[in-house]
Amino acid sequence: MAMTMHVDIVSAESEIFSGTAEMVLAPALMGEVGIMPRHTQMLTPLKPGEVRVTREGGEQEYYYVSGGIMEVQPHVVTVLSDTAVRAADLDEAAALEARNHAEQALKDRSSSMDYAKAEAELAQALAQIRMIQKVRKNTGG
Amino acid sequence: MASGKEIRTQIKSIKNTQKITRAMEMVAASKMRKAQDRMRASRPYADKMHNVIHHLAYAHPEYRHHYLLARENPQRVGYIIISSDRGLCGGLNNNMFKDVLADMRGWREKNIEIDLCTIGQKSSQFFKRFANITAQAVQLGDHPGVADLIGTVKVMLDAYDAGEIDRLFLAYNRFVNTMTQQPVVEQLLPVEPDGKEKELAYHWDYLYEPDAKAVLDGLLVRYIESLVYQGVVENVACEMAARMVAMKSASDNAGDLIDDLQLVYNKARQAAITQELSEIVAGAAAV
């Protein structure tokens, strides 16, 4: 029987594949790589593309990854797949958005609308409780 | 003495409130189950990521990333604070805020400035008064994705890269079980070795493609993101659990109130009947 290794493909939001395999083909940043058991330790980013896993007996399974990182240990291959499409400028845009959000919230004091609403509701509820207690006291119940 | 009608209106309004709280309780219960599933689904990634980072500490790389190096004498620290967007979940958020404030006071006493990054409406509103918020993400909903967090995390990582902050902490609620949620404040950066490492007999290092710096940059950013994401997902589960418990006790309290009021109402009615009867009897006797 051919040698096998353990392969895990996971993304931050779910586990995609976990099992043994004879070979893994992955789209590494520098070109496609094929990993077989007893490969030396390696760390490489992945490009968006498909990861091909050859199970025992030659059966092939395909998984799409939108980029990520692959760690290779002699008997374990771990693919940490991204859930979002990553690119430096996209990340930058997301960061900018988060920053703007914070600034806007500081400027825009009316964003405490929700707070005011909640406060009003609370006041109402308190008044209700007070009223009930009064009723109870008056009737001696 | 309150009249019968007044009390009846009271009872009715409390019953309406009870209906709402009971509905919210059930909604929270079903959402909690889903949130727990998501929490479990994201755990393998976090574990694997942790393993890789751990291996990295075993390896003897020629390049040490600055996320892994301790910095002496911090001048400024950063916090990423995860809270819920909505309230009505008991003391969940406030308990955590209290812990964070205590932590922050420690830094302030040493004259160390604080930068914040808030995730969730509640923390934005609360910490606006206490410190400088540099980034925030709100309205992530019940299905937060990693994509929603990339921006906020990057703001803090950039600040760390630029040397503006020397420590980065993450504050969120850890889901223990339905009844227990534990507020935690963890250090994200610099990445602290967990003390379990032992020296290996032989030295090895990874093959890095294309080069160590590019790979480790990508890896460590993802590591931090996965920790933050895990925090967010746990926090959602906590929020739902806390809301379920809070709404259950609200429903129970409403039930107690209704029972009490019902008793008052019955007494008032009985008193009115007795009075009427005695009036009739008195009237008949007078004739």
Image (cartoon, coloured by chain):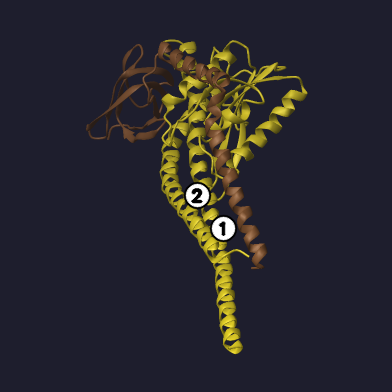
Chain colours: A brown, B yellow
Secondary structure under badge 1?
Answer: helix
Asked if the residue under mark 1 is in contact with the one under mark 2, i.e. CB atoms within 8 Å, the reply is no
| Discs 2/1, front | 1
**Chain-order first, disc 2 or disc 1:** 2
Q: Quadrant of residue B116?
A: top right
What is the x, y in percent for residue B32?
45, 45
* Above or below, B39 relative to A84: below
Along the line of sight, the residue nearer the viewer: B3 or A43 = B3
Question: In the rendered image, which quarter contains the N terminus of chain A?
Answer: top left
* Above or below, A60 relative to B254: above
Q: Residue at x 64, y 53 (%)?
A: A130
Question: In the rendered image, which quarter contains the C terminus of chain A?
Answer: bottom right
Looking at the image, the residue that sits furthest to the right is: B109
The answer for how far apart the CA atoms under marks 2 and 1 are is: 14 Å
What is the x, y in percent for residue B112?
72, 19
Is residue B255 at all visible to an observer of this figure?
no
What is the x, y in percent for residue A125?
57, 48
- Residue ID for mark 2: B244
Mark on residue B253?
1
Mark on residue A94?
none
Secondary structure under badge 2?
Answer: helix
